[in-house]
Image (cartoon, rainbow, N blue to C red):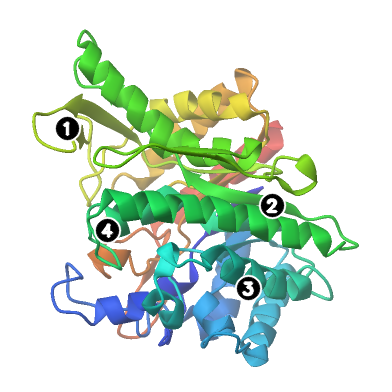
Amino acid sequence: MWGVGHSSFQVEGNLKDSDWRAWTHSPGKIVDATDAEVATDFWNRFDEDFELASQLGANTFRISIAWERIEPARGHWDKEALDHYEKIIEACRAKGLEPVVTLHHFALPLWLANAGGLCAEDFAKEFADYAAYVVERLARGKALVKWWMTFNEPLVMVNMGYLTGEWPPGERDPALAMLASRNLVRAHIEAVRRLRALKLREEIRISIAQHWRDFQPKRSWNPLDRAAAFYLHEVFNRNFVRAVMTGRNIWWMPGGKLHAEVLELPEGLPTLDYLGINYYGRMIAGVTTQAPFLSVEEGSGEKTDLGWEMCPSSLRVVLKDAASYGLPILISENGLADAKDQYRERFIETHLESLREAMGDGVTLLGYLHWSLTDNFEWAFGLKPRFGLVEVDYETMTRKPRPSFAFYRDLIQKFRSES
C-alpha cells in the first residue's frame, strides 16, 4: 500500500458544527491567526486531488470522516453528508486508490464537545452509534471500504486537550486526561463490538492510527532519565494499544491516581486487525524538580519548519517495538513541514530505507502513507506549515506539485519493481 493521506477538518472546509471551528475563532488559539473555513476545499475538489495521487503512482489514499457533518446535532443523521462521502470514496476508487478511512481525526461535533467531549459519560456509546451508522453504509454498496481506523492519535488528543491545554477543550487537569484516555479505550472497544455485529459480507479490517515515538533518555547513565523514557514509552506508545488488544485498561499520570480495569472484548478477541503507526521522530526524556517531573524535548538533529527533529533511524526502532503485538503494520502518517521542499526528498528516502531495514528484521509491513498529499490546516499552527507534496495557493486553490512529488513517485516505482 503506497500512498498519501489527510484529514477532514484540515482540508474539507465549511465544517461549522465542530469544536475545532469554534477554537479557531477564539483569539490567540491559532499561531498564525488563520482558520479552516475553506482549508484546501477538498470537499469540492476531491477529484483533482485523487487525480494527483494517481499521477503520483499511489494505490492508497487515507481520508477521514467529519463526525460533525454526519451528526450535526445529537441523534440527527445527515444522509446528504454521508451520500457525499460515498461519492468521494467512489471517486477515490475510480482512480485506482484503495481508501483507508478514519472515523475520528481530532475534531468533535460541537454538541458533544459542549456535553463534555471525550470526558462525557456516554462518549463510548455516542461514538459507537456514529461508527456503526457510517460503516454500515460505507462498507457496503459501491464504496466497499475495507480498511478502517477508529481514532487518530488518541493520546495526542488527550495530551494537547487535557494536559497542555493547547487544543480544545483547553484543560490542564491530569484527572480529566485519565478520564478521556479511559473513555477513548472504551469507545474503540464498543465501536468494534458494534461493527463486528454488522456481519458485513465483505470482511473489514479495523485499527487505530497510533502516534509512536522513540523515547530516549537525556542521559543514558542516569537511572531517573531512563525511568522517564520508559514511563513515557509505556503511557504514550503502548498503553492504548495494550488496552484494546487485551482489555486491561491501566492508566497513571503524575498528579493523578492509578486506574485499573478489565474490559470485556467483543467475542473475547483483540480489537485491532492491524496497527496504524504515525511516526514523526524521537523524543529526549528526562526528569525535573517541578511537576509533573518529566521533561521532553526534540533531539539535536536537523529540524523541520516546526522545529521537529528528523530522525529516520528511530523509525526502525519504533517498528521493531510495535511489531511485538504480532500485527501487520501500516505507516499511516510520516511527513514534515518543509515549505521550501529542501529536506523532503532526503526525508522520504531515508525513512523508506528504515522501512526496508525493519522488514529485514522481520516486521510485517502493509504499506507507507506519506503525510500529506497537499498542504493543509495544521491545527494550532494554522495554514503556515507546509506538509504537502503538492503546494496549495490558498488564495486561488491552485495545486502545484513540488519537486519531491516526482521524487516520491520514482521511489514508489523503484520499490515496486524490487518487490
Residue corresponding to mark 2: 206
Q: Residue 390's x, y, as percent?
A: 42, 64
In the rendered structure, which disc, 1 or 4, sits on the residue that comes first in sequence?
Answer: 1
Q: Which mark is residue 339?
A: 4
Q: Residue furthest top?
A: 221
- Using the numbered discs, state the Cα–Cα distance from disc 3 to disc 4 in whole angstroms: 37 Å
Q: Residue furthest left?
A: 289
Quarter where residue 288 is shown: top left
Residue corresponding to mark 1: 293
Quarter where residue 218 is shown: top left
Residue corresponding to mark 3: 130
In the rendered structure, which disc, 3 or 1, sits on the residue that comes first in sequence?
Answer: 3
Q: Looking at the image, do the residues carrying marks 3 and 4 touch, with CB atoms under 8 Å apart? A: no
Task: Kindly identify the amino acid type of the residue bearing the numbered disc 4.
Answer: Ala
Q: Nearer the viewer, mark 1 or mark 2?
A: 1
Kindly state the secondary structure of the residue where label 1 is placed.
Answer: loop
- Using the numbered discs, state the Cα–Cα distance from disc 2 to disc 3 in whole angstroms: 15 Å
- Using the numbered discs, state the Cα–Cα distance from disc 2 to disc 4 in whole angstroms: 34 Å
Kindly state the secondary structure of the residue where label 4 is placed.
Answer: loop
Q: Name the residue rendered at 50%, 55% in the picture.
A: 184
